[in-house]
Image: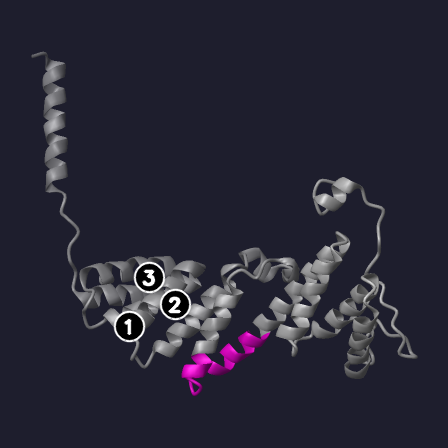
Amino acid sequence: MSIINRSLCILAFALLGACASTPEPQDLPEKVYYDNAKKALDNANFLEAIQHLELLDAHHPFGRYAEQAQLDMMYARYRALQPEAAAAAAERFIRLHPQSPHVDYAYYIKGLANYYADITLGARYLPVDLDTRDPGQAREAFNDFKQLVTRFPASPYAADAERRMVAIKNRLAAYELAAARYYIKREAYVAALERARYVVERFPETPSVPDALALMVELYQVLELEPQAQNTLAVLTHSYPDHRSLDKQGRFIGQEVVRQNRSLRNVITFGLLD
């Protein structure tokens, strides 16, 4: 064997020996994992906290700190901008600890996670029109908050949950109204009317209702449904006499429906190919 080959063999055996002597990760005491996670949380190092909490859950799934670790996990994932994982962690806690005195917090975090799941980081801090964006999981968030305020009305999180439920309703109504206006631009008047009517029927307490009523009046007129137009106009003038679609004499002056000279392709494809 040449000197080079002998040297390579020695090096290979040395590397194998080094690998064999590398210690396996230790199964640390439960409190060590939890203290490490708590320290990371206190320093807002949420990703590091998640790593320690995952190790704690893997090595001590039924230990003294298991329940608190699961609560910390859902919070850490929420603060780490992992809404889907945070909602899943909260759902797991609710399933495993339905009688826990902290289950209301789990519903709250689950609602917050779903509330922000479809809102990008940029949309949280930049002037983005959310009314035109699909609400996505906002309905899930509404159900989470509803369970919280129904089952735990005395919870310290109930008041904020109720405020967020109002905000979700307002957002859902605004989205339906934006969809109605989209259909108007495409001259799909029946579809637009259904969206506007849905706002009035399902979200009667939201700020979108007066605009929805005005759209309904105008769409009924376009569709030559004059009795329905007059009935809806009566509701509009009685409930919202100062709406911008009414002049000083209370006459309707809606101008949102503007007919366009459109090609057959534009009509068939809802304007997507023009």
In what element is the residue under mark 2? helix
Magenta stretch: give its range.
148-166
When asked about the image quadrant of residue 33, the answer is bottom left
For residue 191, side relative to residue 233 (left or right): left
Considering only order in the chain, which callout, 1 or 3, is on the residue closer to the N terminus?
3
Query: Is residue 157 inside the magenta stretch?
Result: yes
Q: Which mark is residue 49?
A: 3
Q: Which residue is mark 2?
A: 75
Q: Is the image coloured rainbow, by chain, by secondary structure, or in one colour?
A: one colour
Considering only order in the chain, which callout, 2 or 1, is on the residue closer to the N terminus?
1
State the separation of the CA atoms marked 1 and 2: 11 Å
Q: Which residue is mark 1?
A: 68
Q: Residue at x 79, y 66 (%)?
A: 220
Residue pushed farthest right? 249
Considering only order in the chain, which callout, 2 or 3, is on the residue closer to the N terminus?
3
For residue 208, side relative to residue 123 (left or right): right
